[in-house]
Image (cartoon, rainbow, N blue to C red):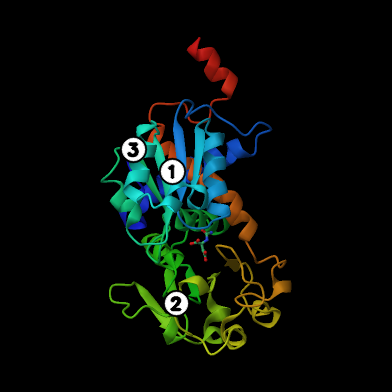
Amino acid sequence: MKHLLSVADLDADDFEELFRLSDSFAEVSARRIPKVPALRGRTVVSLFFEDSTRTRLSFETAAKRLGADTMTFSVASSSMRKGESVRDTIETIDAMGVDAMVVRHGSAGVPQRITDWTDVSVVNAGDGWHEHPTQALLDAYTLRGRFGSLAGRRVAIVGDIAHSRVARSNVVAFSTLGAEVILVAPATLLPPSLDGWPVKVTEDLDGVIDSVDVLYLLRMQRERMTEHLVPSLREYSRRFGLDHARADRLRDGAVVLHPGPMNRGVEIAGDVVDRAELAVVDQVRNGVAVRMAVLWSMLGAGTDLVAEPDEQQGAQQ
Ligand code: NCD
């Protein structure tokens, strides 16, 4: 795999291959020294033109656990504040000699465009409303861990579908893996057209909550909204938020996912966050293993996947 720009580039076998690699890297992450030398000497740079906590830290942790060097670019402290363009920024970083760029940007298509300006591998870490493929991978991996397979499972994705790159990537990922996807949202929070989306749609969360295996709550993307699309956040929360009464109606074994950051009191009541159905901690933990799998797939060909640092050093001497 040269780049990871969209989940549409992955078929079911590619997912399974990345999941098997993730299993190996989850095992590495559980070691006392959670590190392998597979990408020693390689440099991974994270280029975040938009805010992030977990995705940036997760990629950097993943790169470090593989023995790679890491660099971070954050726009707030860079020469972009002096007006430097994305292209000039990329060409500057490229000239320093890096092996992969992990890119987040507020506009759809920027990671793809960057592949025209550099020969190194590019990972889309979220581009505008468009896609967030490693989020979909870690979500699908988390569900595979719970259910063994997604085939035949019912997944409800709830909330701000219109502005959500997580929803776009997950609809494709979950359906590629055989799940049935239901979007639960008011019409104002759906994209103008759902042509070609392999989904059912409802506005009635209470009508589906007791029949789903997975409830996927999306964050209200307030920073991407240009107008009031719901009467009030309180009203949204009343119709689409997860409170104890709704959580009590979930099936035994059902799981609740959220990509973070959570708006407590909007899509989820503050005190529901501690319930056993919530798999948010698993999502974050799995995110590191999955991103190790992605980086290794792009840069690691020919290296020993999970050799302990000392063994590998010994072999090289
Ligand atoms: C998501 C994002 O930034 O797309 N967060 C994340 O990467 N875990 C979801 C969001 O911001 O709502």
Q: What residue type is labelled 2?
A: Leu
Mark 1, residue position: 294
Q: In this view, does 161 lie above or below 50?
A: below
Dot 2 alpha-carbon crowd within 10 angstroms: few under 14, some 14 to 19, many 20 or more: many
Looking at the picture, tell me which residue is in the foreground, 188 or 27: 188
Please identify, in this view, whether the residue under mark 3 or under mark 2 is nearer the observer.
3
Which amino acid does the dot numbered 3 rest on?
Answer: Val
Label 1: element kind:
helix
Residue underneath mark 2: 183
Indicate the secondary structure of the residue bearing disc 3. Answer: loop
Which numbered disc flags the more N-terminal residue, 3 or 1? Answer: 3
The residue beneath circle 3 is 120
The single residue placed furthest to the left in the displayed view is: 116
Distance (Cα) linking label 3 and label 1: 14 Å
Q: Is residue 316 visible?
A: yes
Q: In which quarter of the image is residue 100?
A: top left
Q: Which residue lies furthest to the front in this view?
A: 82
What's the amino acid at mark 1?
Val
Q: State which quarter of the image contains the N terminus.
A: top left
The residue under the point 52% across, 26% down is 37
Q: Earlier in the sequence, mark 3 or mark 2?
A: 3
Label 1 CB sits under 8 Å from any ligand 1 atom: no
Give the CA separation, mark 3 to mark 2: 36 Å
Looking at the image, is 148 positioned above or below residue 166? above
Residue at image position (28%, 76%) is: 195
